[in-house]
Amino acid sequence: MSKISIDQLSQIQQKVEKEQALRQGQTGTGAHRMHLLICGGTGCQAAGSIAVYEALKAEIDKQGLSGEVAVIETGCNGFCALGPVMVTYPEGIFYVNLEEKDIPEVVESHCKNGEPVERLFYKDPSSKKFIPHMKEIPFFALQELIALKNRSLLDAESIDEYIGRGGYQAMAKALKEMSPEDIVAEVKKSGLRGRGGAGFPTGLKWEFCQKSPGEIKYVLCNADEGDPGAFMDRSILEADPHAVVEGMVIAAKAIGSHHGYVYCRAEYPLAVNRLQLAIDHAKEYGLLGENIMGTGFDFELNIYQGAGAFVCGEETALMRSIEGKRGMPRPRPPFPAVAGLWNRPTILNNVETWANIPQIIEKGGDWYAGIGTEDSKGTKVFALTGHVNNIGLVEVPMGTPLRTIVYDIGGGIPKKHRKFKAVQLGGPSGGCIPEDKIDTPCEYAAIMEAGAIMGSGGMIVMDDSTCMVDMARFFMDFVQEESCGKCTPCREGTRRMLQILEKICAGEGEPGDIETLEELSATIQEASLCGLGQTGPNPVLSTLRYFRDEYEAHVHDKTCPARSCVALLKFQVDEDKCKKCGMCFKNCPVDAIDWKKKEVAKINLDKCIKCKTCIENCKFDAIF
Amino acid sequence: MSLAYDLTPQEMPEDVTPEMVERIDEICAAYRGKPGALIPVLQKCQEVVGYLPVPVQEHIAKALGVPGHEVYGVTTFYSFFSMEPRGRHVVRVCMGTACYVRGGKEALDRLERHLNTPVDTTTEDRRFTLEQVRCLGACGVAPVVVVNQDTHRKVMADAVVDLVEQYD
Ligand SMILES: Cc1cc2nc3c(=O)[nH]c(=O)nc-3n(C[C@H](O)[C@H](O)[C@H](O)COP(=O)(O)O)c2cc1C
Ligand code: SF4
Ligand code: SF4
Ligand code: SF4
Ligand code: FES
Ligand code: FES
């Protein structure tokens, strides 16, 4: 490879576009008549997608189709729970749960004879019907993709594939035709707010830094993704790493920076590898480094691997960490836009934020601002998980009601005998939205009003088997463990709160505990230095707001209404409620249950290991 | 982890071979004087030795020319670094929110019971180290258990024992 000019970039694009046209349903323009795009994201790899990919290539060869059928490994497709997944073009047929042994049949029947294999299609959980085409599956049909625009459409390890999708054209435009002021103005016009959690207007942040005096400035990408239950950043880096690189170069031009870092957690090896490949390829093409595409602009980009501390996602701590120190937050001001990494003016944005930038530059800020709501522009990616049928990544216009996401896209609660209880949004800084607020539109202000935050986009659906006190305890355990210890209220206060919550869950709650939790929350929120302490008590406060009766049941009646807290369960069968179905008996791992047909089950407490398997399997809530 | 580690000079533990020390010296030499070098150096050295006992940290401090307490401060701050030797197989159970609500906690309980070792410890025969991690970003296939480099998905409590028994 050699360095390319802006003209050559367009030539590559035109060439690759022809090959890729098949994936838009157009035939006859590329070298292959069929493309098989198999997911190689982390979720699918865990389900064995690499072996399926190898088998597919071997089988295509064996059946003499390698000249006609191309096999391409993509990043996360979004519908991870059904992995390994594959999309075939030009038809757009979606295969799920593929196994090596299915491959000969798929190749023979579908690739050779044009007869797709129905038993491997997606089956709608409610209608039990097969839906062959990806675009007809509700999970995909209701999404609108910007940050995930290239998902499952390209080989994440090929720069040409990215260029074929129009990649690096926005950067070329920014470097050649736009002044730094133009770039900032466009981003401001888009109304884009940071997707890492706080929702700070991105254009404004850039403007501060642009106006900060200094010869040396830095552009950083926050790929720490500390929020448990969130995986959109990982997925973007694995599926479309060049989008992040491109976004960062555009910002570099806007603020006059020549050096950047991506701070990525070490737990994300595949993301780090793909990003490194992207950086190497961009350098080879002269899209990074010195004199980018002959425009005279220089920008170096490096990856910095985090070492496992949640607080390092906080911006000042992240900068400390890159400097090689303990990643502890520091007070602001001075703001990073004035004095950040190595005390130089610095901007930090989240992975998803970066992935939006190229399209804003290409299509204009007005286009972006036309999507979403007045308060929240554009789209947001959510990691939809928990007790919901369709688990995966969901990108929707801001303002989409939670109900649409949970029920229409997510397909609702999987267990028929369970009821929807709440969605948890915003991770350890966030809160729960209960059933009667399920029509809340997903935009910053409305979600805040409902008692949660947008956060980075982790969305955990919980059915009525989830104990809200235990959830609060779970998040407090997280916050307590991740507190850097610099401020006493955060360090000691969260520990005290955790102790109280543990006590309540253990059935040892006392009158006054709930009030103490509230007092401690107020102090910690007020007297903490960084966002971790300031928001740490939120899950407790939000569960108290909506599920106070559950706390009270734990403290005063010593019961856990969700039948979740082991210490408060008796592991006895309610003879009136038992329908004698035997499900508990069949699933107990230690044979601790006596049951015969037409008889009430009985639990042998000497043998029982209190694993709750029977409680999960009893459809009649008969075990308490 | 207790802060009461002895910081007076100690001998290298037996499992740190001269070849390993040589590798450590090479790594330090390559990074010496570079800003922000300490964390990548510690990451690489932990790869070589498997963990970071205090004498290794002291060695690194000297080789990089930074104060020992700074190295120690960083090692203890980040959960990626371990000062204890690990087992032959490291079993990491995800305790992120998605995994927790879908049964990760039950899987962890079952493993603690089966391996007869609490989380964050190593079995006496050094076969397994049991750890919990905060979200591996594979939440779509929760609950997730990682053994060494292999990610296993949808690992419910019933299956987790058989899963680890495949590793000897
Ligand atoms: C304790 C704490 C942890 C955070 N973790 C992350 C993270 O993992 N990823 C992220 O992008 N932002 C995280 N943030 C927010 C960042 O500090 C910062 O606001 C953000 O990266 C800015 O980018 P944005 O404007 O594009 O959102 C965290 C903040 C706090 C207080
Ligand atoms: S609020 Fe907590 S995490 Fe943040 S600086 Fe203070 S002690 Fe550290
Ligand atoms: S709690 Fe577990 S061990 Fe006890 S009876 Fe139920 S299934 Fe069996
Ligand atoms: S699963 Fe429930 S209803 Fe069925 S036998 Fe057991 S206790 Fe009775
Ligand atoms: S990893 Fe394959 S769909 Fe997400
Ligand atoms: S919560 Fe376990 S992988 Fe994300």
Image: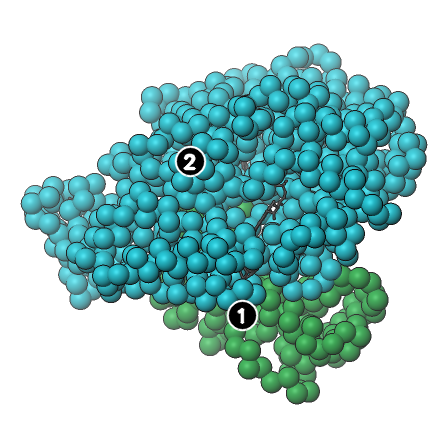
Residue B40 appearing in the image: no
Residue receiving disc 2: A449
Residue type at tag 2: Glu
Q: Is residue A111 left or right of residue A458?
A: right
Residue B141 at x, y percent in the picture: 47, 43
Q: State which image quarter holds ligand 2.
A: bottom right
10 Å crowding of disc 1: few (<14), some (14-19), many (20+): some
Q: Are marks 2 and 1 on the same chain?
A: no
Chain A representation colour: cyan
Secondary element at tag 1:
loop
Residue pictured at 79% horizontal, 27% vertical: A182
Q: Is residue A256 left or right of residue A35?
A: right
In the displayed structure, B21 sits above or below A406; it is below
Front in this rendered view, residue A301 or A195: A195
Q: Where is residue A211, by image quadrant?
A: top right
Residue receiving disc 1: B87
Chain designation of label 2? A
Front in this rendered view, residue A215 or A421: A215
Find out if the beta carbon at label 1 lies less than 8 Å from the nearest ligand 6 atom: no
> In front of the other: label 2 or label 1?
2
Residue A582 at x, y percent in the picture: 17, 45
In the displayed structure, A464 sits above or below B58; it is above
Find out if the beta carbon at label 2 lies less than 8 Å from the nearest ligand 1 atom: no
Chain B representation colour: green
The label number, if any, that marks residue A554 in the structure image: none
